[in-house]
Image: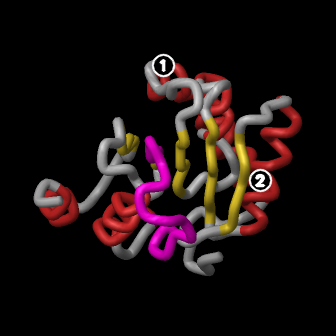
Amino acid sequence: MRKDYVHGYSEREAIRLVDQAKALALLMHHDTSYPEDSMVLEAGCGVGAQTITLARNSPLAEITSVDISEPSLNHAKALINREGFSNVKFQIADIMKLPFEDETFDHVFICFVLEHLPDPVGALLSLKKVLKKEALSLLLKEIMAPVTSIQRLQRL
């Protein structure tokens, strides 16, 4: 868990993030769904604010949600269990050192994460390794990134 995470890990912040995600869900994720039996990695799931929408929109996909923070993952698990979804499993993992074989996932989903990382391009390269070569998507839903990072991403 990163000590310098700008939002912190309080319960109040977890509630705020979930409320924010609910408010933006229709706008941001109206078209976010994955086919039956798809292996989906949600990188940086945090408190599960986006996980709920992924699980709801893709009930037959197999979603693996990872985060570096155990307290955040515990909150996400509780949220998913409370909603009754069974298509999500959680794992502690650092995006920069993912514990998966190369080309494991059909899809990678990352939302509101890159702006919190010191090396967003390195994170995307790490995610690219676990994405199958014939994969259908690496879905980025980010609101901000330094121009230099965007320029480097275009060369990936």
Q: Residue at point 52% right, 20% down?
A: 26
**Tag 1 secondary structure:** loop
Relative horizontal placement of residue 65, taking residue 10 as reference (left or right) = left
The front one of 96 and 8 is 96
Predominant SS along the magenta part: loop
Q: State the image coordinates of residue 88 (x, y, percent, origin top left).
A: 71, 42
Image position of 36 with respect to 89: above or below: above
Determine whether label 2 and label 1 are within 8 Å by CB.
no
Mark 1 surroundings within 10 Å by alpha-carbon count, few (fewer than 14), some (14 through 19), many (20 or more)? few
Badge 1 amino acid: His
Badge 2 amino acid: Arg
Residue furthest bottom in the image: 3
Q: State the image coordinates of residue 83 (x, y, percent, origin top left).
A: 83, 30
Q: Which residues are magenta?
A: 95-109
Q: Residue at point 54% right, 65% down?
A: 100
Image position of 57 with respect to 9: above or below: above
The front one of 62 and 27 is 62
The front one of 64 and 14 is 64
Q: Residue at point 53% right, 49% down?
A: 41
Q: Nearer the viewer, mark 2 or mark 1?
A: 1
Image position of 24 with respect to 9: above or below: above
Q: Which residue is mark 1?
A: 30
Q: Which residue is mark 2?
A: 12
As for residue 8 lying within the magenta part, the answer is no
Q: State the image coordinates of residue 130 (x, y, percent, origin top left).
A: 43, 59
